[in-house]
Image: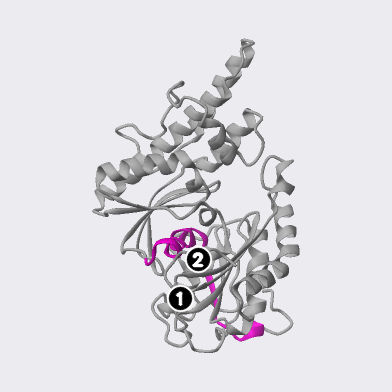
């Protein structure tokens, strides 16, 4: 049974299953309202480790093989039948196109077979919404710093189901990507984030002053850049090796990590102050980093800002976050997705979910909690029009 620390669930709250396949984790979560009932994950990270990064084709095949067993495990952990569900939510993007397609196809099949509404939701918005499972309803607006291998973003969300506004993002390497690349240079393996975090605890974060990207007076206030930092660290290591000197791995790890979290936390706190938001939510895989959590806690406390960070397991990609956003969609009567829902590898964060084309982004009173039916396919000239022979459009 999943560890539930949120408020006690009510039978009147929406019961939603969420499917996450944007990268290398096959995640299936089940949520009732703000309460986590199951969080089943099948990871293919070991299959990618020998390549030093995620291989899209390998990830897609792993999702395909793990999907049904992981859904069955989640249902068993939650102690419910699939017919009890009020809806099926799935990550529609952004992410790896092939991996997303596996999840979307599975979600369509289950929603159609069960006669339940289908909700295609945004991966980044899901990372924000998952905090409701830990700390209760999100304040509105919410300021969020999302940091992972694929994105580093500052987002303002007045309404997590309908209004998410990007303030800043990475213009080159994301923070997690930089961790992976530096770990590779140091021969520490993949993924790089956890091992650098661990080794850095024995190092001096002030041993080497690595650059802080985009922190000059004329630089974009909320954008991030870690490519220059990555290059500076790699060149420093190469110079040491060329001189025949030992590389102080712990000090390099600690100094590199300090440069990353210094920039992330400074910009996040500034965004809160500039927009009059008195709380900060941090999510994404890098939010599990111990130094990021410690520095954010100190700086938020100094600035009078309340910090919200989910436990590490909920920070990485998982089905619980998708189910959490799906449950919020149902609770607020947002429009369900159509059967022609497709994967969008570059789905903008300004689209927290993908409603059917014949609906706007406002409330949908036809497919809310308790409606008892799946999203109705709309009539238009489309190659992927729904039929029983083409569930995987």
**Which quarter shows the C terminus?**
bottom right
Foreground residue among 386 and 184:
184
Q: Residue at x 58, y 15 (%)?
A: 239
Q: What x and y, as percent, mark residue 54?
A: 67, 47
Q: What x and y, as percent, mark residue 5?
A: 46, 64
On screen, residue 350 above or below 255? below
**Which quarter shows the N terminus?**
bottom right
Q: Quadrant of residue 30?
A: bottom right
Residue 120 drawn in magenta? yes
Asked whether the viewer can see residue 50, the reply is: yes
Pointer 2 or 1: first along the chain: 2
Q: Residue at x 73, y 58 (%)?
A: 62
Magenta-drawn segment: 112-137
Q: What x and y, as percent, mark residue 368?
A: 46, 84
Residue 93 drawn in magenta? no
Q: Quadrant of residue 118?
A: bottom right
Residue 9, labelled with which disc? 1
User: Residue at label 2?
Assistant: 4
Foreground residue among 305 and 151:
305
Q: Is residue 165 left or right of residue 37?
A: left
Foreground residue among 221 and 125:
125
On screen, residue 83 above or below 51? below
Instruction: Report if the CB atoms under discs 2 and 1 are less than 8 Å apart.
Output: yes
Q: Is residue 339 left or right of residue 219?
A: right
Instruction: Tell me the distance, in whole angstroms, between the alpha carbons under discs 2 and 1.
Output: 10 Å
Q: Residue at x 61, y 15 (%)?
A: 246
Q: Is residue 50 left or right of residue 285?
A: right
Q: What x and y, as percent, mark residue 190?
A: 65, 40
Foreground residue among 58 and 392:
58
């Amino acid at each position: 049974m999943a560890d539930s620390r949120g408020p006690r669930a009510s039978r009147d709250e929406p019961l939603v299953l969420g499917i996450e396949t944007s990268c290398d984790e096959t995640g299936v979560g089940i949520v009732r309202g703000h309460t986590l009932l199951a969080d089943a994950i099948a990871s293919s990270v070991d299959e990618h480790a020998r390549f030093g990064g995620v291989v899209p084709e390998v990830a897609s095949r792993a999702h395909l093989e793990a999907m049904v067993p992981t859904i069955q495990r989640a249902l068993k952990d939650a102690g419910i039948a699939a017919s009890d569900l009020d809806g099926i939510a799935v990550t529609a993007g952004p992410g790896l196109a092939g991996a997303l397609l596996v999840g979307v196809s599975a979600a369509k099949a289950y929603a159609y077979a069960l006669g339940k509404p289908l909700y295609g939701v945004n991966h980044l918005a899901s990372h924000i919404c998952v905090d409701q499972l830990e700390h209760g309803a999100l304040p509105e607006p919410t300021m969020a710093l999302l940091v992972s291998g694929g994105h580093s973003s500052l987002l303002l969300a007045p309404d997590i189901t309908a209004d998410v506004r990007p303030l800043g993002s990475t213009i080159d390497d994301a923070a997690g990507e930089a961790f992976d690349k530096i770990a590779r240079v140091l021969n520490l393996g993949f993924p790089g984030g956890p091992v650098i975090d661990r080794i850095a605890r024995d190092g001096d974060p002030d041993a080497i002053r690595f650059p802080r990207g985009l922190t000059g007076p004329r630089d974009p206030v909320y954008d991030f850049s870690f490519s220059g930092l990555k290059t500076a660290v790699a060149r420093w290591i190469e110079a040491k090796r060329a001189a025949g000197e030992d590389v102080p791995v712990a000090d390099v790890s600690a100094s590199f990590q300090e440069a990353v979290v210094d920039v992330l936390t400074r910009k996040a706190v500034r965004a809160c102050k500039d927009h009059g938001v008195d709380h900060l939510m941090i999510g994404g895989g890098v939010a599990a980093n111990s130094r990021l959590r410690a520095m954010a806690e100190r700086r938020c406390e100094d600035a009078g800002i309340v910090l919200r960070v989910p436990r590490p397991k909920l920070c990485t990609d998982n089905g619980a976050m998708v189910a959490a956003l799906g449950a919020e969609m149902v609770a607020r009567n947002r429009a369900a997705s159509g059967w022609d829902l497709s994967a969008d590898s570059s789905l903008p964060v300004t689209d927290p979910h993908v409603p059917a084309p014949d609906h706007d982004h406002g409330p949908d009173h036809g497919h809310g909690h308790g409606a008892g039916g799946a999203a109705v396919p709309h009539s238009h000239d489309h190659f992927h029009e729904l039929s029983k022979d083409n569930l995987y459009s």
